[in-house]
Amino acid sequence: MKLISWNVNGIRAAWKKGLLEFVAASSPDVLCVQETKIQADQITPEMRDLEGYRSYWSVAEKKGYSGVATFSKPEPLAVATAFGVPVLDAEGRIVHAEYPDFHLFNVYFPNSGMGPERLAHKLAFYDEFLALTERLRSAGKGVIVCGDVNTAHTEIDLARPKENAKSPGFMPVERAWVSRFVAHGYHDTFRIFVSEPGHYTWWDMRRVGARARNVGWRIDYFFVSDELRGRVKAAGILPHVQGSDHCPVTLELG
């Protein structure tokens, strides 16, 4: 099974920049996109009914903000976009699809770059999300989490760690949560295969030439819980794929 996750930074813009061609060429079984920046009434029939896929959307009330969508060839057993937890249900950030042998969470985690209040919101989101996935795991089925986590976990996950030691997305408290998530039995699938630095998934477009010089951050992930670790066959990053300030990340399960 082949899964792809991509923060498209606006699905309408990505649609015009080759998203359809990318999907046709890569043909994932499941495509998870984040930061769709679209309202329900703006989703076109072509987007909703992408050939070969069923689609499931979560949108924010605020226009041009947040949003995630999951496109799936196999039909899930169930899909949820609300969980009865206000911090998780706000802003259209999660699509949860349950399949016969795993739960898949497509998530656009909050950004902490707008001050202490947003950092507190992000940390609350993190904690409630971990509680949610742990409840599901306790019922016996493994969990896959993909999306824009908005935190670079370790120093090798960004090009300039020293300069960004206090920057949103690399603050100790954010990194500590990712470590805690991993300690609960979730595996950063890319790091199963690649241990060296220099691999990133996001480049700040405000910095001239950041992507060309590969001055980036790795903030987009596929995690799998212990129950699924043995099925991981490959995981990768596709930095050559343009169309967003992020690039796609991939996971293959046996």
Image (cartoon, grey):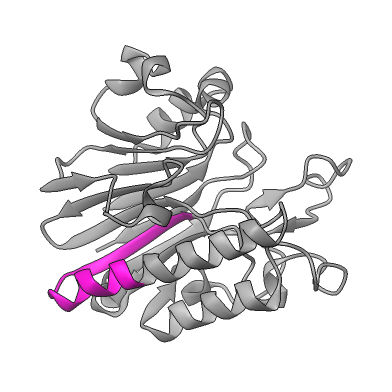
Judge whether residue 77 is colored magenta: no
Judge whether residue 132 is colored magenta: yes
Q: Quadrant of residue 17?
A: top right
Q: Residue at x 41, y 32 (%)?
A: 23
Give coordinates of residue 146: x percent, y percent.
42, 56
Q: Is residue 22 left or right of residue 185?
A: right
Q: Is residue 95 left or right of residue 117?
A: left
Give coordinates of residue 122: x percent, y percent.
55, 61
Q: Quadrant of residue 154?
A: bottom right
**22 to 128, vertically: above or below:** above
Q: What quarter of the picture does the C terminus occupy?
A: bottom left
Q: Residue at x 50, y 58 (%)?
A: 236
Give coordinates of residue 33: x percent, y percent.
44, 40
Q: Residue at x 52, y 46 (%)?
A: 248
Q: Which residues are magenta?
A: 131-147
Could you say which is closer to the camera, residue 74 or residue 89? 89
**69 to 144, vertically: above or below:** above
Q: Is residue 147 left or right of residue 49?
A: right
Could you say which is closer to the camera, residue 142 or residue 169? 169
**78 to 24, vertically: above or below:** below
Q: Is residue 38 visible?
A: yes
Give coordinates of residue 168: x percent, y percent.
72, 62
**41 to 57, vertically: above or below:** above
Q: Residue at x 39, y 67 (%)?
A: 128
